[in-house]
Image (cartoon, rainbow, N blue to C red):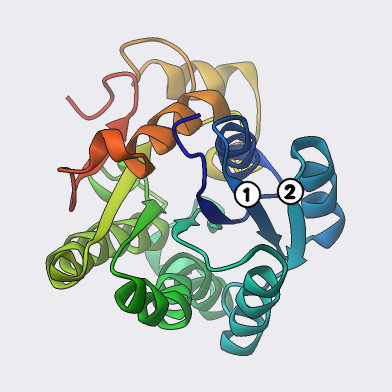
Amino acid sequence: MRLEGRTAIVTGGGSGFGAGIAAAFAREGAQVAVLDVNLDAAEGVASDIGGRAFHCDVSDGASVTAAIEAAEAALGPVDTLVNNAGVTHLPAALEEVTEADFDRVLAVNAKSVYLTARALVPGFKERGGGAILNIASTAGVSPRPRLNWYNASKGWMITATRTMAVELAPFGVRVNALNPVAGETPLLTSFMGEDTPEIRAKFLSTIPIGRFSTPEDIAAAAVFLCSDEASMITGVALEVDGGRCI
């Protein structure tokens, strides 16, 4: 029960890493608000873990504000935020990615961190504490070709984590990131372009441990970084990658 008494928001909590994190937080005693653009998916996860579900388009300021206000009205003040929602563009030469895809990747992966911070940081400061966890990627550290703008968005998230950590530390707010390697989530096929045994084998050959990450892998690291066990850790981008970035 490492998160007992905590109230957490998990964006993109309706599937993949977000669903795994939401479930682990609930098992560790937190009240969990599952935010997702797919409300049905969020409600499914929330029902399974005893949480609450809220519709949220993390790229839209009004939607983020409304969802967080609704979550706090239902559960009380939020003290833990996981910015997990993310998208990618399909593998392509950098100059061939459409402007619409570029805008969507940056809005969901980068702008969302600003929007959730804008909504929650004032309360964190007022109450003298909080934890923010940004789900970045090994792509922000060791980029793969043909995923250029996705790589860049995750590099942005890592830098945002570090600067947020420095600025918010005097207020008792810790900010960290996780860098997962490609995982068994709905985004996996998008990263690969197509899901074939040959392409899977090519991806796996770059991961020394020899498997993709799982929601449980990411959730275990998330629980630690958001718990009091990590009270001296801020500004870290922890690789959960089976050795890929070595």
The quarter of the image holding the C terminus is: top left
- Under circle 2, the secondary element is loop
Image location of residue 177, percent across then percent down: 31, 49
Name the residue furthest bottom.
62
Image location of residue 225, percent across then percent down: 32, 39
Residue 158, above or below 194: below
Q: Nearer the viewer, residue 17 or 107?
A: 17
- Disc 2/disc 1 C-alpha distance (Å): 6 Å
Image location of residue 148, percent across then percent down: 36, 57
For marks 2 and 1, the one nearer the N-term is 1
- Under circle 1, the secondary element is strand
Residue 29, above or below 207: below
For residue 52, side relative to residue 86 (left or right): right
Residue 194 visible = yes
Q: Which residue position is annotated with label 1?
A: 31
Residue found at x 62% / y 16%? 197
For residue 140, side relative to residue 63 (left or right): left
Residue found at x 57% / y 77%? 59
